[in-house]
Amino acid sequence: MDYTSTIIGAVISFISSIGILIVERLFEKFGKLRIYTKIVYDRSTGSYTWGFRDTADGLVLNVPLWLEVVNHSKRPRILRDINLLIASRGKVLTPMLQINYAKTNDDNLSFANEGSYSLSINGDDVRRIVCHYCLKANHNTAVFDEILLRYFDEKGRAHTFSLGYVEGDWHIKEFPRNETWIELKEKRYRNTL
């Protein structure tokens, strides 16, 4: 009789500890990943902000920005291939070029996460990365009306956000620079390349 109650107690204890682990894992998943952005000046020149510029390589769409990623969950999260895309009427047209490094007269600059546009962020943590994106105009370049930010999570799912609507007509101009941080809201798009 004593063995039976000991075995039953051990089974109950084992089942309850598994239940506690399952509940803890579920609670770790709660909490959102929030992404904030701020358009800044080009680090290599110190003067240009986002917009169309005439360069030695031709007309270029230039987007320097800071990203701040806040992980409100208890588990680590991965953001892979953080990139900008241009879109027209909700349809994604093409990705932009991620600038990894730039040379200036005085220094070599690295962007993003030491040249990588992917990062791992611990639970209850905040990470800021300095990004720079460009897209060179060519004969196939289409007029666009929106710039999107896209990344892939640890399961390979794409997450897409709108940075805003712009007049993407490929004429030399700078767009207004926001002075404050903007929280990005996730949106669904017809295709994300």
Image (spheres, helix red, strand yellow):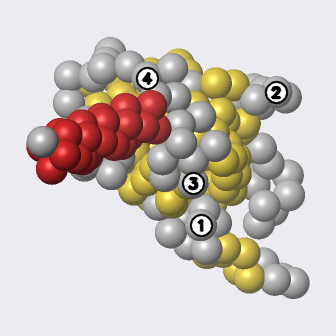
Type of residue at label 2?
Thr
Report if residue 119 is visible in the image.
yes
Please identify the quadrant where the C terminus is shown.
top left
Q: Is residue 192 left or right of residue 7?
A: right
Tell me the crowding category of disc 3: few under 14, some 14 to 19, or many 20 or more residues within 10 angstroms, Cα based. Answer: some
Q: Which of pointers 1 and 3 indicates the residue nearer the eye? A: 3
Please identify the quadrant where the N terminus is shown.
top left
Disc with the residue nearer the chain's start (2 vs 1): 1
Q: Circle 3 — which element?
A: loop
Q: Which of pointers 2 and 1 indicates the residue nearer the eye? A: 1
Q: Is residue 99 above or below residue 25?
A: below
Question: Which residue is under mark 2?
Answer: 180
Where residue 170 appears, x then y in whole percent? 50, 36
Question: Which residue is under mark 1?
Answer: 113
Disc with the residue nearer the chain's start (2 vs 4): 2
Type of residue at label 1?
Asn
Q: Is residue 17 left or right of residue 102?
A: left
Type of residue at label 4?
Glu
Find out whether the residues at labels 2 and 3 contact each other: C-beta distance under 8 Å: no
**Distance of label 1 from label 3 (alpha carbons):** 15 Å
Q: Is residue 191 above or below residue 2?
A: above
**Distance of label 3 from label 4 (alpha carbons):** 21 Å
Where residue 109 appears, x then y in whole percent? 72, 75
Q: Circle 1 — which element?
A: loop
